[in-house]
Image: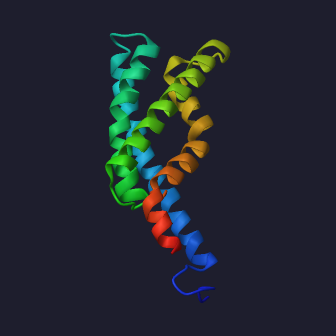
Amino acid sequence: MKPLSPGKPSLPEKWTVLSRQVINFLIVGGSNFLLTYVLYIGLLLWASPLVSYIVSTVFGILYVVVLNMVSVFKSRFTVLKFLMLFAYNVAYTAVSIAVFRWIQRNIDVSPVMYPVITQCILLPLHFLCTRFIAQARSAARHGADRT
């Protein structure tokens, strides 16, 4: 199918790009989850579940910010975009901690399952927010595109 207008991808091409992004996001997120989950389990030997979760999550933030920008969404690396994604991931961490605590208080499962359930609940929204930030154009560039 040919693009509807010059320079713009057709609908099937957009779905292909989105599919690749979802798959790559899941790969990066999965590897980050494994990394932080192993750290979480190890930290449980010395710390409470909440402290273990916070420490392991903080280590994962830089990992996902860089990989999502560079390899998943293939966006241009800028300091502003990095800071926006970093700030978003800190906010996401706060939300995930709240969900984690809710699970801890309200669902009768092993502490080993708390992070798994937390991520299952938050992952779809996390993808959409990260994609939006990573692919956002700067105000100056966006204005230049319109002229």
Residue pushed farthest right? 106
Is residue 43 left or right of 4 when viewed as pictured?
left
Residue 101: x and y, percent?
57, 17
Q: Is residue 94 above or below residue 77?
A: above
- Quarter of the figure that contains the N terminus: bottom right
Residue 64: x and y, percent?
38, 43
Q: Nearer the viewer, residue 109 or 67?
A: 67
Residue located at (39% from left, 60% from top): 75
Residue 137: x and y, percent?
47, 59
Q: Is residue 85 above or below residue 9?
A: above
Residue 66: x and y, percent?
33, 48
Q: Quadrant of residue 56?
A: top left
Is residue 29 left or right of 79 when viewed as pictured?
right
Residue located at (55% from left, 64% from top): 18
Q: Nearer the viewer, residue 102 or 66?
A: 66
Residue located at (59% from left, 70% from top): 15
Residue pushed farthest front? 147
